[in-house]
Image (tube, rainbow, N blue to C red):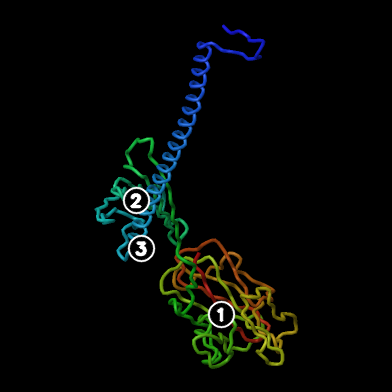
């Protein structure tokens, strides 16, 4: 109950009202403190969960990387641990003996699977590794896949984290016609030692110097028979040191020599549209490029010869003629059979054959 003192214009509260107000204030204050405390606790919990998640992911990545390193190292050893045609053999990685399983997923393929354990700083991580080899389109391709985990691979923990890494490789493309890569050149004839067939497989794509002082690169091949068209039997051949798989052959003709000068000769690969004068009458005193020719291959070390797809060339005027085709395996030899040039001689600066 309250009463009003009209003289002093004051309001008085009795003791019960005072107790209720204090209790209400205490409840509100306690609620605010509790809310703030729960918010801070929740934020701390989220930070802890996030921190744990980052650590788990990092451990899983480390395990996956360890799997890649192990498989790559074993695959690159001289005694290949993962031949496409099995069986599987044991090896050691990170102090543990590994016994992979070998399967054949398909034609011309082979696959190895193994598990690495005891990884990461806590020795609880693991990696499941697959090494797949495919030789359907030579050269052989390898794909290594590693799935890393922060815990044991068989664990069903809700904190289990996975990271996946993959590595694939194929041998680099190689000019297998080069003498330095085992190619051996021969020809229907040779004008003289300055124009020997061997000069066409030394990577001298410009042909300079032409006709002498070739050194390790330069010059090219020219036959010794000045004859009318069509040429009957002018050819340049390259024998590989063993059967190869190829998908491209490049033929480099002799560049024009106006006034007998070689000063303007350039590397044709930097200017694939570079041409020579292939217009009649023939012979042309300053033009020497190949007009009609066939690019052929053999899988028997010689005859019979087969023209590569797109290798029957006519009315050519390009200095750098590149012929690409689907990969052909077991090739022992290639040759260029010339039937027409802008000169009375057949001349080739460089002949290249490339692996895929």
How would you rate the neighbour count of disc 2 (Cα within 10 Å): few for under 14, some for 14-19, many for 20 or more? many
- The residue most toward the top is 1
Q: Is residue 287 left or right of residue 42?
A: right
Asked if the residues shown at circle 1 and circle 3 are in contact, with their CB atoms under 8 angstroms apart, the answer is: no
For label 3, the SS is: helix
Name the residue beneath numbered marker 3: 76
User: In the drawing, what numbered circle is on residue 68?
Assistant: none
Rendered location of residue 192, percent (x, y): 54, 92
Residue drawn at the location 33% of the way across and 47% of the way down: 126
Front-most of 65 and 208?
65
The structure residue drawn at horizontal position 60% and vertical position 78%, both measured from the top left corner, is: 252
Which residue carries the number 1 mark? 350
Relative image position of residue 278 (x, y in whole percent): 71, 80
Number of residues whose C-alpha sits closer than 10 Å to that of mark 3, classed few (under 14), some (14–19) or many (20 or more): few
Give the x, y percent position of residue 87.
29, 53
- Coordinates of residue 191 in the picture (x, y in percent): 56, 90
Q: Residue at x 59, y 75 (%)?
A: 251
- The answer to which of 65 and 33 lies nearer the viewer is 33
Left or right position of 293 against 169: right
Position of the N terminus, as image quadrant, is top right
- The residue identified by callout 2 is 112
Picture layout, residue 86 above or below residue 257 = above
């Amino acid at each position: 109950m309250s009463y009003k003192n009209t003289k002093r214009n004051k309001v008085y509260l009795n003791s019960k009202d005072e107790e209720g107000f204090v209790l209400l204030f205490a409840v509100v204050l306690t609620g605010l403190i509790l809310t703030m405390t729960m918010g801070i606790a929740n934020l701390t919990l989220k930070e802890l969960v996030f921190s744990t998640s980052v650590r788990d992911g990092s451990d899983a990545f480390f395990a996956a990387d360890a799997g890649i390193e192990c498989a790559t190292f074993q695959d690159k050893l001289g005694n290949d641990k993962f031949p496409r045609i099995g069986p599987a053999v044991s090896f050691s990685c990170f102090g543990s003996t590994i016994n992979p399983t070998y399967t054949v997923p398909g034609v011309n393929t082979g696959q190895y699977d193994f598990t690495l354990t005891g990884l990461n700083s806590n020795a609880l991580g693991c990696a499941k590794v697959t090494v797949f080899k495919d030789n359907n389109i030579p050269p052989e391709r390898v794909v290594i896949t590693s799935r890393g985990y922060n815990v044991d691979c068989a664990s069903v923990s809700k904190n289990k984290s996975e990271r996946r890494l993959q590595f694939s490789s194929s041998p680099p493309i190689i000019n297998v016609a080069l003498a330095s890569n085992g190619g051996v050149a021969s020809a229907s004839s040779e004008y003289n030692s300055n124009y020997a067939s061997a000069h066409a497989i030394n990577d001298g794509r410009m042909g300079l110097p032409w006709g002498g002082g070739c050194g390790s690169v330069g010059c090219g091949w020219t036959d010794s028979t000045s004859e009318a068209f069509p040429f009957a039997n002018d050819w340049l051949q390259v024998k590989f040191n063993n059967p190869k798989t190829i998908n491209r052959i490049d033929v480099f003709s002799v560049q024009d020599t106006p006034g007998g000068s070689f000063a303007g000769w350039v590397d044709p690969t930097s200017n694939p549209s570079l041409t020579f004068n292939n217009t009649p009458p023939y012979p042309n005193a300053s033009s020497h490029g190949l007009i009609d020719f066939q690019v052929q291959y053999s899988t028997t070390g010689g005859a019979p010869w087969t023209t590569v797809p797109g290798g029957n060339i006519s009315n050519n005027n390009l200095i750098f003629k590149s012929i690409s085709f689907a990969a052909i395996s077991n090739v022992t030899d290639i040759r260029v059979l010339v039937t027409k040039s802008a000169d009375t001689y057949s001349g080739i600066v460089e002949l290249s054959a490339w692996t895929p």
